[in-house]
Image (cartoon, rainbow, N blue to C red):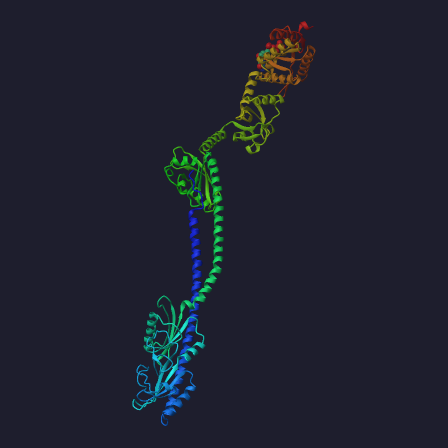
């Protein structure tokens, strides 16, 4: 079965893995960003503190050196003129007592030789002043700063040439100030700055952990440093670079330095007046150690939580996937069962997925598709290809439109009957489409039934219907209980009842005339219940009460099991024909002038009655009647009066006789009466009554009253009579005697007397 199940695809798994990895990456990026932010914030904070360190150190240095400068200037200005070397020594010692930041104070003569000093060991020394900064020999009274020296004082000190070397444990920096009175005769004061004092002062302000401060002259020479170790070459190069920037006027700044394998946060600022600057550094890794520790701590707290969340998501996905797999397996089992079921169906079944492509089809559909060039050989059939196979009659929905409406959820059902395009067999199909949802998005299930046979049957039925409707004979179909189920228009024309009025009723309730004995109907029923056709003539009554004759044929109809299910009655209106027959019969059997039976009929009845008498021994009598002197009536009153007399006599006789008696005109003015079930006495009485009434009443002809009498002869029908003529002969003989006896008489046969 060509089928495309909705399954939990590998794409879903891949998408989930990608999603999970993306979530992990996002979580990692968030943690990384968070850690970076902590580091950046920590670095910024540490930089600010480092800047404060640099600022404090420089500020302290500037103040101290300004104080030193003022102290030296004050000593020079007050002690120059009047004091000798001894006084200067005392003066300088006193001054040193109040200056813990100084190691010694020495007075220099204009050759640069120490002539007085707070420290006797310095006397006579000639410290080199050429590399002091600012350069020159003290013109202008500016404090000039020498290099860092290792040692306690001038006597044992030696200059530290390498700015990056490890600072000596005991060190001083010489500074000098002159009075600014020219090169010759100029005095100067040289003070040695106590490096330890400065380091201690800087140290009292807590330096950042991992930070150190270098104080450099503007030429890059080291003045003091809080570090203990020598700088590496890269850091030294960085220092020189900063010194260059100082000299170029870049007085303050901060930057990250990456000498060797570490990163340093460096900030610097230069003094406003003095030729020196402070350079504070911090090992970034050490500075950020705490922040990194905090980041790690948070990471190790968050990591299990994130891992737990991902584990939960993964478990949920696996559960979902397992349920989906079970669902798909159940679906596939359903589909398998459906396959067997659908393949057994004679109707074509096709299921379109939500995308309009076929996902399921049965054998009947494949057979149908194999015979269609527009469908055969296609991998997956689209509903539009399928719909193109059918012709749409005007006013009908197209197959494509119906299926599309189902797929779009606009309709819940679609049905229609369609002819196939280019089909020589004129085949017709019924297409029924319903929404189909089986685990995936809704599709459309299409059932295609071949209704060609039904169409042909309907066509035949229509033709039969039209034939029955057009039939001249009334046709009625009843059920086995004779209840009318259908009647054609001719039935209405015949009975006056419309089909609507007739259906649900029995014919006996509508048209029964009461003219037939129950036995008649019983015989009819017996015949048709035996399954035989009944034919006969029936007198029925129309809706308006008028009787009519019909020739009726009732045909029983059996079902496939042989059970009587229906009766079909065909009725022909024979009223006119029956009237014509009656008239012909009447004309053939009666005398045209009087209406009495003619001689032939009378003789037949006489013959029949004689047979009854002979067979059953019953009694019957015959009267022979002849009007007296009838010729005279003709002669006197005319032939018309004679005819009127004959008619009036007939009427009088029939009025007088019984219903069962038969009056016949045998010829001329001669009549005969057959009296069944009558003995001679009764016959004589009747004859006498006729004779007496005629004699008494006479015949009225116009205004005239014609007197006329009748002579009557009576004969009894005997079992010994072999022919009617023998009876007639006896009656005639009695009549003759009545004539002979004077007319207007009744005579019996001779043997009876
Ligand atoms: N008007 C008329 N006359 C008829 C008809 N048939 C026979 N006749 C006449 O009836 C008359 C019969 O006369 P008759 O046989 O001589 O007998 P009658 O005159 O009745 O005399 P009796 O029988 O002897 O009493 C004849 O003149 C017939 O022409 C008929 O149909 N109409």
In-image side of 669 versus 87 (left or right)? right
- Residue 67 visible in rendering: yes
Residue 501: quarter of image: top right
Q: Is residue 413 above or below residue 568?
A: below
Ligand 1 quadrant assignment: top right
Look at the picture and state if 647 lies above or below 418. Answer: above
Between residue 23 and residue 643, name the one nearer to us: 23
Q: Residue 444, how many percent across, how many down? A: 46, 43
Q: Position of residue 228 (x, y in %)?
A: 39, 73
Quarter holding the C terminus? top right
Residue 729 in which image quadrant: top right
Q: Nearer the viewer, residue 644 or 77?
A: 77
Q: Residue 335 in the image: x percent, y percent?
A: 47, 39
| Furthest-bottom residue in this view | 82
505 and 723: which is toward the camera: 505
- Horizontal and vertical percent position of residue 519: 62, 21
The N terminus - image quarter: top left
Residue at the limit of the structure toward the left, as seen here:
184
Above or below 623: residue 352: below
Q: Which one is in front, 309 or 420?
A: 309
Report the label total: 0
Q: Is residue 415 left or right of residue 634?
A: left
Q: Is residue 310 above or below residue 576?
A: below
Quadrant in the rendering for residue 213: bottom left
Q: Is residue 273 visible?
A: no
């Amino acid at each position: 079965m060509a089928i495309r199940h909705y399954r939990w695809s590998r794409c879903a798994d891949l998408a989930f893995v990608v999603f999970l990895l993306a979530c992990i990456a996002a979580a990692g990026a968030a943690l990384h960003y968070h850690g970076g932010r902590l580091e950046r914030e920590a670095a910024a904070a540490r930089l600010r503190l480092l800047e404060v360190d640099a600022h404090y150190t420089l500020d302290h240095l500037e103040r101290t050196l300004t104080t030193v400068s003022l102290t030296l200037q004050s000593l020079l200005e007050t002690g120059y003129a009047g004091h000798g070397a001894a006084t200067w020594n005392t003066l300088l010692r006193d001054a040193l007592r109040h200056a813990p930041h100084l190691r010694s104070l020495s007075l220099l003569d204009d050759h640069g030789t120490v002539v007085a000093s707070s420290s006797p060991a310095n006397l006579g020394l000639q410290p080199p002043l050429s590399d002091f900064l600012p350069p020159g020999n003290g013109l202008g009274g500016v404090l000039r700063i020498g290099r860092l020296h290792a040692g306690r004082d001038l006597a044992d000190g030696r200059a530290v040439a390498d700015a990056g070397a490890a600072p000596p444990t005991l060190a001083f920096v010489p500074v000098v100030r002159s009075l600014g009175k020219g090169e010759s005769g100029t005095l100067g004061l040289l003070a040695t700055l106590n490096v330890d004092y400065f380091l201690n002062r800087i140290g009292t302000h807590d330096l950042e952990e991992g930070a150190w401060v270098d104080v450099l002259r503007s030429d890059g020479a080291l003045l003091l440093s809080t570090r203990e170790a020598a700088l590496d070459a890269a850091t030294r190069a960085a220092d020189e670079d900063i010194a260059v920037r100082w000299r170029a006027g870049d007085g303050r700044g901060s930057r990250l330095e990456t000498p060797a394998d570490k990163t340093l946060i460096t900030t610097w600022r230069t003094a406003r007046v003095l030729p020196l600057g402070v350079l504070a550094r911090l090992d970034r890794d050490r500075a950020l150690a705490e922040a990194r520790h905090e980041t790690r701590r948070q990471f190790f707290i968050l990591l299990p939580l994130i891992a737990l969340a991902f584990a939960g998501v993964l478990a949920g996905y696996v559960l979902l996937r397992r349920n989906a797999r079970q669902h798909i397996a159940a679906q596939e089992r359903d589909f398998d069962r459906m396959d067997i079921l659908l393949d057994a169906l004679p109707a074509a079944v096709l299921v379109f997925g939500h995308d309009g492509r076929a996902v399921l089809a049965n054998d009947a559909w494949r057979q149908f598709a194999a015979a269609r060039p527009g469908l055969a050989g296609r991998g997956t059939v689209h509903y539009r290809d399928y719909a193109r196979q059918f012709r749409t009659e005007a006013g009908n929905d197209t197959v494509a439109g119906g299926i599309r409406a189902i797929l779009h959820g606009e309709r819940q059902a679609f049905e229609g009957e369609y002819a196939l395009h280019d089909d020589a067999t004129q085949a017709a199909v019924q297409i029924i489409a319903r929404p189909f949802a089986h685990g995936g998005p809704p599709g459309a299930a299409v059932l295609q039934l071949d209704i060609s046979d039904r169409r042909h049957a309907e066509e035949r039925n229509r033709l039969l219907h039209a034939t029955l409707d057009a039939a001249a004979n009334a046709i009625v179909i009843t059920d086995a209980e004779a209840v009318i189920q259908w009647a054609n228009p001719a039935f209405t024309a015949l009975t006056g009842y419309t089909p609507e009025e007739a259906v649900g009723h029995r014919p006996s309730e509508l048209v029964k005339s009461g003219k037939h004995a129950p036995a008649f109907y019983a015989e009819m029923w017996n015949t048709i219940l035996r399954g035989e056709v009944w034919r006969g003539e029936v007198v029925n009554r129309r809706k308006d009460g008028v009787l009519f004759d019909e020739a009726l044929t009732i045909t029983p109809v059996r079902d496939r099991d042989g059970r009587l299910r229906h009766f079909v009655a065909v009725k022909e209106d024979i009223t006119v024909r029956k009237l014509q027959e009656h008239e012909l019969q009447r004309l053939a059997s009666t005398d045209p002038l009087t209406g009495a039976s003619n001689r032939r009929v009378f003789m037949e009845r006489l013959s029949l009655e004689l047979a009854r008498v002979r067979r059953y021994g019953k009694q019957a009598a015959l009267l022979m009647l002849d009007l007296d002197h009838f010729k005279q009536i003709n002669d006197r009153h005319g032939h018309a009066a004679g005819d009127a007399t004959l008619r009036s006599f007939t009427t009088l006789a029939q009025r007088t006789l019984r219903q069962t008696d038969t009056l016949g005109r045998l010829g001329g003015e001669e009549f005969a009466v057959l009296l069944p079930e009558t003995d001679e006495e009764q016959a004589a009485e009747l004859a006498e009554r006729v004779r007496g009434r005629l004699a008494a009443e006479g015949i009225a002809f116009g205004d005239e009253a014609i007197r006329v009498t009748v002579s009557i002869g009576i004969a009894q029908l005997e079992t010994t009579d072999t022919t009617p003529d023998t009876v007639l002969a006896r009656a005639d003989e009695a009549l003759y005697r009545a004539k002979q006896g004077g007319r207007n008489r009744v005579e019996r046969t001779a043997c009876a007397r």
